[in-house]
Image (tube, helix red, strand yellow):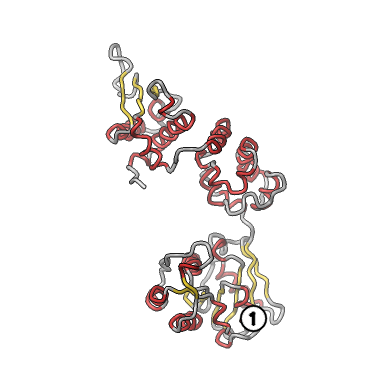
Amino acid sequence: MTDRPPCLNNTCVRRTLNRYLDMLDKQPFEGRSKRLTDRIQPKHFPELFSPREPGEDDVTWHHLSQLEALGIVTFERTRTRGIRSDSPWEHTRIVIAPEGEQLMRDWLDRPVVDEESLRWQEAVGPFRHAFEVPELIRPANLGRLARYQPEAVVKRLAMIPEMLAASPLTLYQLSAQLFWGDSKALKGKERFLDQLFSIQVTQMLSRPVLIEGTYHPGAEGILLVENMDTFLAASNGQIKSAENLTILFAQGFKGTTSRIRAKGMARFYWSDSPFPESDWLNHFHEAWFGASKFPGPIYYFGDLDPAGLSIYRQMRTTFPELEPWKTGYEALVKALERGHGHPLALADKTNQGSLPDTGCAWMEAHVIPVMRETGLCIDQEFFLN
């Protein structure tokens, strides 16, 4: 992608270029008999005519002027006589250069739209004011929502902030209420919603994370594991090296790291035998929710593949004190060195391929080099063999 110029950080510049691309999506240069021009007026350029703070008009004009230097537009005076204002943007029109279209599309990640995408853009029109970035509403970003009628979907998307302000809802409840009982219509669309409305929508509709735990009296630390089979084996005493650790498991650690330590967003369910003592449990809750430090080390053990390493990296952000469970990882590394494992390039999983930086010096020194050298990955269940 072409390097984005600094002027693109200006709100007025981004809004203006998106508006020009909207025009071109409806009628390309090839179908126009006249030049594509735009009068600089208060409706579309409020920063120039009604600045919210001193100097905003001059700063905005400076950034708009950069577009001329980049060959995207040219400026033409519509009057040369009797102009009382010294402002260079008054009585001025912008002429959009055909040769600048591809640059605009590259910068804004807006390729030429097909007929289907154009239908969605037209549906957005009456509701543009409801979205911070209405250009995000296009089939590629909508998943299963793209199956429905554009007008109906856009109308319902615009209702989301109001509905969340009225009552707390989970993502599935919100989806079912808005989209004809389809509770999974918004599944995996949290980041899309955050960007679409420029608010932390996901913080308003997150489900609590359900965490299963097995308490071992006198445990010397805590072990978080990625997979259910490993959790069950450790809970049942089948992993001798984990007998001195309390074991925790949550379905989908990767998707829950942003809220797993927020009060009200984590619920623990403990094995009935033995149940944690009240003193230990109180101290544990205080540490988990950030009111105190964990009394002992806290470890993580996951798959040795790109997805598993990404989860570990995200978990380290949430738990700065998190350490790799070396007993498990060392066993997996030895298995890789013996040729066990499956090729990274053939792994039938999402987000597989290049190895992410975990941010952990021990993993980068002892684990990642072996994965790169062998070209193999291996799931943590192999440790149970």
Percent x, y of residue 280:
61, 77
In the picture, measured across the screen, residue 76 lies left or right of residue 293, that is left
Is residue 319 visible to us here?
no
Query: In the figure, residue 74 lies in which quadrant?
Result: top left
Q: Residue at x 44, y 31 (%)?
A: 24
Taking depth in this image into account, of 72 and 7 the one nearest to the observer is 72
Taking depth in this image into account, of 9 and 215 the one nearest to the observer is 9
In the picture, measured across the screen, residue 284 lies left or right of residue 176, that is left
Residue at the outermost bottom position: 240
- Which residue matches tag 1? 235
Taking depth in this image into account, of 234 and 47 the one nearest to the observer is 234
Number of marks drawn = 1
Q: Which image quarter is the C terminus in? A: bottom right
Percent x, y of residue 250:
61, 68
Percent x, y of residue 275:
69, 79
Q: Is residue 82 above or below residue 151?
A: above
User: The residue under label 1 is which amino acid type?
Assistant: Ser
Report crowding for label 1: few under 14, some 14 to 19, many 20 or more residues within 10 A (C-alpha): many
Percent x, y of residue 170:
66, 53
What SS does tag 1 mark?
Answer: helix
Is residue 347 visible to us here?
yes
Q: Residue at x 40, y 28 (%)?
A: 29
